[in-house]
Image (cartoon, rainbow, N blue to C red):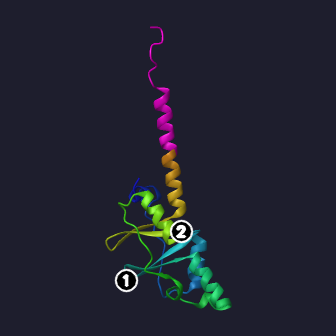
Amino acid sequence: MQVHEILRIKGTVLYTVAPSQSLGKAVATMTDLDVGSLVVMEQGRMTGLLSFREVLRAVQASGETWQDLSVADVMQKDPSTAHPDMEVDELRRLMLEKRCRYLPIMEGDTLMGVLSFHDVARAMLEEQSFENRMLKSYIRDWPLEDMSG
């Protein structure tokens, strides 16, 4: 299975935020949309990624004033990315090595989507379920040898 297949299943809805937006507003957006990350976009290009990990670090470091920080102050600059033609096993390995729960998928300079570790796990589970059904069907329809001879 390749990354573009997971993107096709998930859909290509992107949730974005401007780097100048306040962290408080970004967290409200994340909460309202029930998402764990936002792509930071400026002039049509990805400049960073904001996830709950960066938010928690900002809360720890800034205390009560965390909401007034800008997204640019706390975002992950230059996040690791993956390519749509990457195999899922390679994607999982990258996510584990880089400790990424969210990974932007880029084709050249074009952002194709963001995959979460949850998206990858769900796709793998669905693929295994499909393979199991196919194998069970194959076994059930297997022609039995004539045992009388």
Image quadrant where one finds the C terminus: top left
SS of the residue under disc 1: loop
Nearer to me, 103 or 19: 103
Residue positioned 53% across, 89% down in the render: 70
User: Which comes sooner in the sequence, label 2 or label 1?
Assistant: 1
Q: CA distance from mark 2 to mark 1?
A: 25 Å
In the image as oriented, which residue stretches furthest toward the front?
149
In percent of width and height, residue 82 lies at 40, 67
In percent of width and height, residue 121 lies at 53, 57
The answer to whether the residues at label 2 and label 1 have Cβ atoms under 8 Å apart is no
> Any mark on residue 62, and which?
none
In percent of width and height, residue 14 lies at 46, 69
Nearer to me, 97 or 43: 97
Residue positioned 39% across, 56% down in the render: 2
Q: Quadrant of residue 12?
A: bottom left
Q: Is residue 26 magenta?
A: no
Q: Is residue 130 magenta?
A: yes
Q: Residues within 10 Å of mark 2 (few under 14, many from 20)?
A: some
Give the residue type at disc 1.
Answer: Gln
Residue positioned 49% across, 67% down in the render: 95
Question: In the figure, 10 relative to 39: above or below?
Answer: above
Q: Which residue is mark 1?
A: 43
Give the residue type at disc 2.
Answer: Arg
Question: In the figure, 103 relative to 72: above or below?
Answer: above
Segment tinted magenta in the rendering? 129-149
> Any mark on residue 101, and which?
2
SS of the residue under disc 2: loop
